[in-house]
């Protein structure tokens, strides 16, 4: 079964995955003046820009929430967005930039895109830890925050499945990595990072369903900041399409990896 096989390959090589991911993370920040401090600085700068535009320029207000609480709502949407898009941009080039590993018959190439997704989660983990502390400080933390690990796991499954697919396609269609960059900017504009479904006009709300990030961002905001169970069928849809993408992604990668060595 493709679902079980995907989990098995990750579990079987978990030590290799952990060690190589740690090496990649250290290499990413090696030689940088600020080093690991970028894990805090990058989302903080982006949050400042978002907050300035929506609060100072557009003067958006969110119901009974105070300005600091509204900033937390933005942060709850921004952090998973950064985690997802960074994983997507890293996984799309993961195969083409690791040709030596692809040709190494001893290395499990199935985990190369998985490693890219795991490495991308550093910013999200640090950001979520800060967000939980801030949410508790402003009295927004409820028992619904216990859903965060569940939401994150399915976000990882979705990202890994998508990573398997795009990393394969990029081997034969290298323009894809440039398309992903443009797509990331487009997703930033249409994802409900600084607004909720209630703020969207009725005629446009059905279009939100076509954005997979809508489900994750809404689930994070509802469970951590709004203090309620994710609205409607958001959680159910998120679980279903995450598992579907994970299964399809692993199946697709298994079919394509047999001819990688001749094309990377």
Image (tube, rainbow, N blue to C red):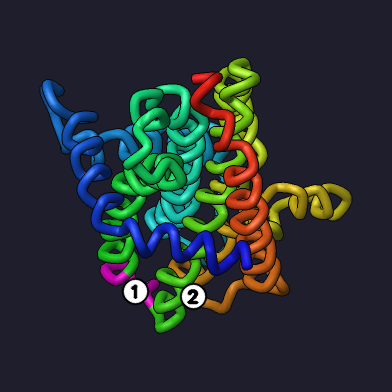
Query: Residue 27 placed where, x, y %?
Result: 19, 30
Is residue 140 magenta-colored?
Answer: yes
Residue 227, label in figure: 2
Q: Nearer the viewer, residue 81 or 199?
A: 81
Q: Nearer the viewer, residue 35 or 188?
A: 35
Q: With respect to residue 177, does 130 lie above or below?
A: below
Q: Nearer the viewer, residue 163 or 46?
A: 163
Determine the residue positioned at 15% across, 23% down. Answer: 32
Residue that sits furthest to the bottom in the current view: 143
Of callouts 1 and 2, the N-terminal one? 1
| Residue underneath mark 1 | 139
Residue that sits furthest to the right in the current view: 203
Left or right: 191, with 33 as reference point: right
- Which residues, given as a range, are shown in magenta? 136-141
Total number of numbered labels?
2
Query: Residue 232 placed where, x, y %?
Result: 71, 74
Q: With respect to residue 185, does 206 lie above or below?
A: below
Q: Is residue 52 visible?
A: yes
């Amino acid at each position: 079964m493709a679902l079980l096989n995907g989990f098995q390959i990750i579990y079987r090589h978990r030590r290799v995955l952990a060690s190589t991911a740690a090496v990649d993370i250290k290499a990413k920040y090696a030689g940088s003046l600020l080093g690991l401090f970028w894990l805090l600085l990058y989302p903080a700068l982006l949050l400042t820009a978002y907050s300035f535009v929506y609060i100072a320029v557009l003067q958006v207000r969110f119901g009974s929430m105070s300005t600091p609480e509204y900033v937390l709502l933005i942060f709850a949407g921004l952090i998973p967005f950064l985690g997802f898009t960074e994983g997507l941009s890293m996984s799309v080039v993961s195969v083409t930039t690791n040709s030596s590993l692809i040709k190494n018959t001893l290395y499990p190439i199935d985990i190369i895109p998985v490693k890219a997704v795991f490495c991308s989660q550093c910013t999200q983990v640090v950001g979520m830890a800060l967000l939980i502390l801030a949410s508790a400080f402003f009295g927004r933390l409820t028992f619904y925050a216990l859903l965060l690990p569940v939401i994150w796991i399915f976000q990882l499954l979705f990202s890994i499945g998508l990573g398997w697919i795009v990393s394969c396609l990029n081997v034969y269609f290298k323009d894809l990595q440039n398309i992903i960059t443009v797509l990331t900017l487009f997703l930033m504009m249409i994802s409900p990072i600084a607004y909720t479904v209630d703020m969207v006009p009725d005629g446009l709300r059905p279009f939100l369903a076509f954005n997979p990030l809508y489900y994750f961002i809404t689930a994070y905001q509802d469970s951590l900041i709004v203090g309620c169970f994710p609205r409607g069928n958001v959680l159910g849809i998120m679980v279903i399409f995450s598992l579907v993408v994970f299964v399809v992604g692993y199946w697709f990668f298994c079919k394509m990896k047999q001819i990688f060595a001749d094309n990377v």
